[in-house]
Image: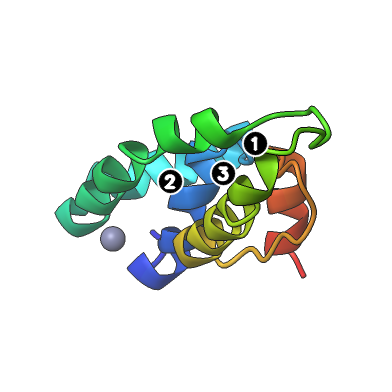
Amino acid sequence: MKSCAEIRPLIGAHLLGALDDDETTVLFTHLAHCQECAAKHSRLSQLMPLIDLAGSSEAPVGLGEPGTTVVGPAIGNAIFRACGARVRDLPIRPAAVKAAMKV
Ligand SMILES: [Zn+2]
């Protein structure tokens, strides 16, 4: 079984949909035996609706949108904190998170 330090990055990646089936199995095998990591997974999963709210494939076009420029970096920082993946381009997609995790 992997250590908690090895599993923690997978928690955020899973919630972003960036894990394949084998990685998901490794994660949930660990969560079934580790209350601390399971609690972290639970807490992070509560943030996902906020990330969904900020997601958009539309280019910014309106005068009112400059006020939202901090949302993308804030989400990027949250993803970095959750799984160690630094993604610098928007929109932040699961494939980009997974690629950044392997750097
Ligand atoms: Zn653990």
C-alpha span from label 1 to label 3: 5 Å
Residue at 67%, 40% (x, y): give it: 65
Please tell me which of labels 2 and 1 falls first in the chain. Answer: 1
Q: Which mark is residue 27?
A: 2
Per the image, label 3 sits on a secondary structure element best described as helix
Instruction: Characterize the local packing of mark 2: few (<14), some (14-19) or many (20 or more) Cα atoms within 10 angstroms.
Output: many
Tell me: residue 31, above or below residue 102. above
* Circle 3/circle 2 CB separation < 8 Å: yes
Residue ID for mark 3? 23
C-alpha span from label 2 to label 1: 11 Å
Indicate the quadrant containing the C terminus: top left, top right, bottom left or bottom right.
Answer: bottom right
Instruction: Characterize the local packing of mark 3: few (<14), some (14-19) or many (20 or more) Cα atoms within 10 angstroms.
Output: some
Residue ID for mark 1? 20
Residue at 41%, 61% (x, y): give it: 8
Per the image, label 1 sits on a secondary structure element best described as loop
Q: Position of residue 35 (x, y in %)?
A: 16, 52
Q: Is label 3's Cβ within 8 Å of ligand 1? A: no
Q: Amino acid at mark 1?
A: Asp
Q: Nearer the viewer, residue 55 or 43?
A: 55
* Circle 2/circle 1 CB separation < 8 Å: no
Left or right: where 77 falls relative to 42: right
Q: Which mark is residue 80?
A: none
Q: Position of residue 36 (x, y in %)?
A: 19, 58
Residue at 76%, 33% (x, y): give it: 62
Q: Amino acid at mark 3?
A: Glu
Tell me: residue 19, above or below residue 88. above
Where ligand 1 lies, by image quadrant?
A: bottom left
Indicate the quadrant containing the N terminus: top left, top right, bottom left or bottom right.
Answer: bottom left
Q: Position of residue 81 (x, y in %)?
A: 47, 66
Per the image, label 2 sits on a secondary structure element best described as helix
* Circle 1/circle 3 CB separation < 8 Å: yes
Q: Position of residue 71 (x, y in %)?
A: 56, 50
